[in-house]
Image: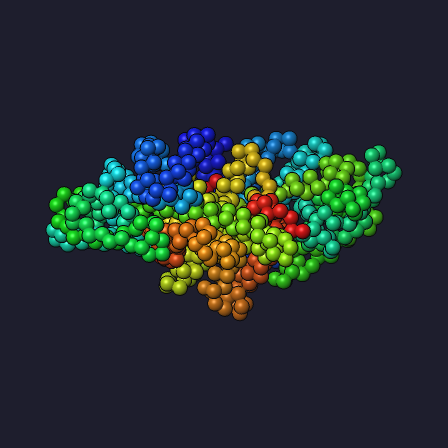
């Protein structure tokens, strides 16, 4: 996709999501379907994920399209009525396990789990990996309000029969996690830039000691650090798109977590009193990034995992070249 | 030549010539030994052609994308054949001379720099001029009318001039207009360091090395045809350095830091605390690498690099600190108490790394630029 097409897609997605955001996740999912989300994901997976998730983050929109990203990464045809079981918060292990003829699974799911007719569950069985579609009747799901009730997450348990399970390639889950991580990191990137925009606007408007607080170097340096964090994440996402791999996606997700924390801390301090209220939009982005940070592993866990790999192999990979 | 093809060919050649290229001294080596090593490596690379890729044919190059020479700098830094802090002066100075010197002069001197026959230094900072470069006061006075003078007479002082005592030439910024003219009253010259009236006094750095110096100019006569760029156009010359300093130089530094982390993971115990420290350093280095890669792709696509490279500068300084902090944390006693050659080398590098938030524009100046130019927060007053 060239730059012009991408810009057009971005404008279309943002307009659609902005118009529907107030209607909640059903409305946002509906407009994304209208603009051809599933075809786009099939034809232009990178641009589709980059643009749509970034826009969701930037506009504070809630949708369930993460299910489609993960499902299609597993080689399954995505559809609006098919949900997927995500790993538990702060984890990236397969959410299910097969014991004998039985599937036990638990994890998180998007709001789609409340409306789907079936869910895809990836299970480990010893060293093997299996995927199984379970009817919604065997899915026990509870709405999670948590820090961000608008995000619509659900806590899910599945007890089902293994019938119909299919064997997956050993790397299938890792690859699906990588797609999921890139998508979530894009959403965090959009939300992080939104927080920074809000804080900059506030700094320019808010007058204290006879001048806008944007003139104080202490404030400027906080916002500068926030921009460094936002652009670091955007660079990591660019690299992960150009050189897709399990490692570049893991790094993008870890950098997303770290960046969001930096941006949130600096912007919240600059927004001060007003940023501490629900009158101001900031809190929505803050809460969304906190909720998203744990999907497919948080930065701290990913960093330790990467460090273990480096020490175990005694090798520091460059991963991306000029 | 395609960059991947260049990289593969280069690394194959470096592998094949490892014994010839490797330093003869044992660590840490003296600065004299480092300089001799660098010039020897440049000479071998120049003769084999690698050093000529990415430079224009009119200065003895073989053409091709400047990214080729970035790859070369990174390859030799990543193999510890040269120190990028010394080597990357090429990237800071040669493009400036190519763009602003009379063509015949550039054609004569640039191949001498690339082949290791010469060293050059950069005379920008002064005792009263650190971050505020436009305040410099080292004066150049024309012998007669400024437009027709055949020579200029330079008086004043420079400081933090890296490798001045080894240098044959200096790209020098001088004041040619009134001080109030600030950046509009500055002119650049290409000065022979053996000119009468130049005194070099090396300064001992915090790590014991004498890498930079004070340089005194006492009525130094410089021919008018050594002016770089226009009269009072020295600011453009100074600014022309930025794109290379913030792209290819950084890529070399990144390769050097990756090599440090590689050496660290070869030496540390395999436990959870180590994993966390190593993982964090790797994350910071990779972040910098991703950003720098994007910057260089923009440069190669024809973009003019500007204020946004302050973000690259913040990231390179952060990664430098984090890498050496990891080394200090995971190799306890090495920086602090180890008198072996390896310990001395780590100690010297550790102490040098503390300058990363100071040289090339301090961390605070970068944040000021980011706030004003990238976040559009207006002026501070």
- Say if residue A150 shows up in the picture: yes
A279 left or right of B241? left
For this rendering, which residue is in front, A280 or B372? A280
Q: Could you tell whether B235 is left or right of B329 in the image?
A: right
Q: Residue at x 67, y 46 (%)?
A: B119
Residue ID at (47%, 46%)? A193
Give B191 or B139, whichever is nearer the viewer.
B139
Asked whether A23 or A139 is in front, the reply is A23
**Measuring 49% from the left and 41% from the top, which residue is drawn there?**
B294
Q: Residue at x 39, y 51 (%)?
A: A288
Q: Position of residue B314 (x, y in %)?
A: 55, 51
Pinpoint residue B217: horizontal percent, then vertical percent.
79, 50
Q: Is residue A166 left or right of residue B264?
A: left
Compare residues B148 and B337 and report the one nearer the observer.
B148
Q: x, y (%) of residue B180?
A: 78, 46
Q: Where is residue B212? Give x, y as percent.
A: 67, 55
């Amino acid at each position: 996709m060239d730059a012009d097409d991408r810009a057009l897609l971005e404008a279309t997605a943002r307009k659609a999501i902005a118009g529907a955001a107030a209607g909640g996740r059903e409305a946002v999912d509906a407009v994304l379907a209208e603009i051809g989300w599933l075809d786009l994901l099939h034809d232009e997976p990178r641009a589709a994920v980059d643009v749509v998730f970034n826009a969701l983050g930037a506009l504070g929109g809630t949708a369930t399209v993460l299910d489609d990203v993960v499902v299609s990464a597993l080689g399954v045809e995505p559809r609006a009525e098919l949900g997927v079981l995500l790993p538990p918060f702060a984890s990236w292990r397969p959410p299910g396990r097969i014991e004998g003829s039985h599937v036990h699974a638990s994890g998180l799911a998007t709001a789609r789990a409340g409306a789907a007719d079936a869910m895809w569950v990836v299970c480990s069985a010893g060293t093997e990996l299996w995927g199984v579609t379970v009817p919604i009747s065997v899915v026990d799901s509870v709405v999670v309000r948590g820090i961000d009730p608008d995000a619509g997450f659900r806590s899910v348990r599945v007890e089902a029969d293994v019938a119909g399970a299919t064997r997956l390639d050993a790397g299938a889950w890792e690859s699906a996690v990588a797609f999921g991580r890139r998508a979530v990191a894009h959403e965090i990137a959009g939300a992080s830039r939104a927080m920074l925009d809000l804080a900059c606007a506030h700094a320019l408007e808010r007058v204290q000691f006879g001048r806008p607080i944007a003139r104080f170097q202490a404030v400027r340096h906080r916002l500068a650090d926030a921009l460094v964090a936002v652009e670091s994440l955007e660079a990591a996402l660019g690299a992960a798109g150009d050189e897709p791999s399990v490692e570049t996606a893991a790094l993008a997700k870890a950098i997303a977590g770290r960046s969001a924390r930096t941006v949130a801390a600096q912007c919240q301090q600059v927004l001060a009193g007003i940023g501490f209220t629900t009158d101001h939009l900031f809190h929505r982005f803050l809460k969304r990034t906190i909720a998203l940070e744990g999907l497919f592993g948080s930065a701290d866990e990913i960093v330790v995992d990467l460090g273990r790999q480096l020490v175990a192999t005694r090798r520091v990979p460059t991963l991306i070249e000029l | 030549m395609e960059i991947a093809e260049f990289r593969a060919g280069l690394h194959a050649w470096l592998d094949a010539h490892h014994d010839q290229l490797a330093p003869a001294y044992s660590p840490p080596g003296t600065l004299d030994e480092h300089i001799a090593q660098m010039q020897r490596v440049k000479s071998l690379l120049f003769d084999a052609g690698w050093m000529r890729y990415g430079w224009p044919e009119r200065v003895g190059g073989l053409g091709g994308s400047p990214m080729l020479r970035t790859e070369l700098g990174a390859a030799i830094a990543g193999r510890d054949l040269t120190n990028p802090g010394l080597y990357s002066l090429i990237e800071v100075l040669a493009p400036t001379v190519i763009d602003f010197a009379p063509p015949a002069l550039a054609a004569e001197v640039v191949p001498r720099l690339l082949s290791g026959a010469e060293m050059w230094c950069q005379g920008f900072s002064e005792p009263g001029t650190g971050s505020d470069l436009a305040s410099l006061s080292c004066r150049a006075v024309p012998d007669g009318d400024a437009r027709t003078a055949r020579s200029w007479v330079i008086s004043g002082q420079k400081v933090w001039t890296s490798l001045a005592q080894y240098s044959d030439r200096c790209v020098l910024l001088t004041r040619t207009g009134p001080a109030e003219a600030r950046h509009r009253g500055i002119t650049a010259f290409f000065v022979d360091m053996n000119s009468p009236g130049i005194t070099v006094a090396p300064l001992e750095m915090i790590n014991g090395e004498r890498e930079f110096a004070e340089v005194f100019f006492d009525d130094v006569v410089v021919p008018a045809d050594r002016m770089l760029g226009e009269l009072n156009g020295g600011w453009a010359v100074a600014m022309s350095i930025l794109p290379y300093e913030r792209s290819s130089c950084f890529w070399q530094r990144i390769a050097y830091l990756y090599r440090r982390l590689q050496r660290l993971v070869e030496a540390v115990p395999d436990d959870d605390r180590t994993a966390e420290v190593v993982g964090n350093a790797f994350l910071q280095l990779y972040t910098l690498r991703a950003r720098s890669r994007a910057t260089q792709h923009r440069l190669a696509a024809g973009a003019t690099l500007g204020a946004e490279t302050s973000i690259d500068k913040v990231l390179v300084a952060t990664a430098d600190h984090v890498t050496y902090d990891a080394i200090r944390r995971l190799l306890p006693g090495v920086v602090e108490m180890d008198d072996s050659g390896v310990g001395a080398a780590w100690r010297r590098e550790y102490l040098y790394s503390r300058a990363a938030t100071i040289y090339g524009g301090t961390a605070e100046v970068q944040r000021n630029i980011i706030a004003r130019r990238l976040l559009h927060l207006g002026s501070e007053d």
